[in-house]
Amino acid sequence: MTSEPATLEVRQIDPADEMTLRASYDLERRALLAGREGSPHWSWSEMAAIWRQPDPGEDGRLYGGWVEGRMVGGAVLFMPLEDNTSKCWLGVAVDPAEQGRGHGRALLEAVEAVAREHGRTELMAETKLPFDQITQHRHRRFAEAAGYDFANVEIVRHLTLPVPDADLDAWAAEAAERHAGYRIETFVNEVPDELLESMLVLHGQLAVDAPTGAVDWEEEVITPERWRANLDSLLSAGRTMYETLAIADDGTVAAQTTIAVPSNRTDVSQWGTFVHREHRGHRLGLAVKVVNLRAMQQAHPQMQRVITQNAESNDFMVSINEKMGFEPVEAATEFVKRV
């Protein structure tokens, strides 16, 4: 006689609950690094700080799944509040020792129900896959069986540090031939008030102009207050934030790039790089990336690699990354379900 499988209990996790939050982190780490050992993953202190000081521009929720008192899986849900309010990002993770028992599907259905209750009609998810398994990996089969369609693929690239000064000098000189009239400045853990508003215009436009496959995005609303709140969260997580800006002769920001440096890991994260639509064609993307990388590298010689990802169709940014020596490592495969 076969017994019925134990019922999965799904409930939201309070980030103030230290023990449960830590159990969630440990499970997430085991699940996301299975088969990807050696890949970068945020630290426990980073995860805790980010969940305890969330982005005020989105409703972020963390869930756990328990069977007979054991946490066997988890899920996340992020719902924008100021823009793109038909969309959400979600994801599930099941402890490798507990996979194959339907827990992932039950967790997914639970967070999908919350998303629908909040009027979300475009549900999006991402998973990182080996290049040779993009079409047949079990994560993709899981997503498609749950009604998700392939939407986009971004290429994850790593850059080994340190980059020789001679290379940085050559790239800077190449860019300088095209960007006369712009000044390039780097700011650490702050951006002056007089530059912040025009910089945030670029941050908001990035979601619109960067290739996003089958999903269209509205311009993101990022106020100075929201940006400062997120900066406080990042600093609480032990990260040092490098922002290099190209500033036009009228004092507005024409291009920007961001690097996040953790305090307890050796993997640096290259975040967005964006050139204002009216200032393209001056090699500003290369210029700001080189200056930012040099500043970070000089201040943090212990860092061993830079991690970034871009849509494979983003020819402009891919060409810069390839010039700088970034090597493709895996695919960040994105899916969408419209309900």
Image: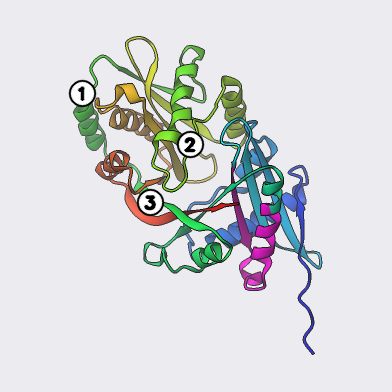
Say what amino acid the circle numbered 3 marks. Answer: Ile
Per the model, the C-alpha gap separating discs 3 and 1 is: 28 Å
Going from N to C along the chain, the mark reached first, 3 or 1, is 3
Q: From the viewer's perspective, is the residue at label 2 or at label 1 nearer? A: 1
Q: Is residue 269 above or below residue 35?
A: above
What residue is rendered at 56% in x and 26% in y? Answer: 227
Relative image position of residue 108 (x, y in whole percent): 65, 58
Relative image position of residue 237 (x, y in whole percent): 60, 37
Q: According to the image, label 1 marks what residue?
A: 178
Per the model, the C-alpha gap separating discs 2 and 1 is: 27 Å
Instruction: Left or right? Give the position of 146 relative to 293.
Output: right
What residue is rendered at 59% in x and 24% in y? Answer: 228
Label 2 close to label 1 by CB (< 8 Å): no
What residue is rendered at 54% in x and 62% in y? Answer: 143
Under circle 1, the secondary element is loop
Going from N to C along the chain, the mark reached first, 2 or 3, is 3
User: The magenta stretch spans which residues?
Assistant: 87-112
Q: Which mark is residue 260?
A: 2
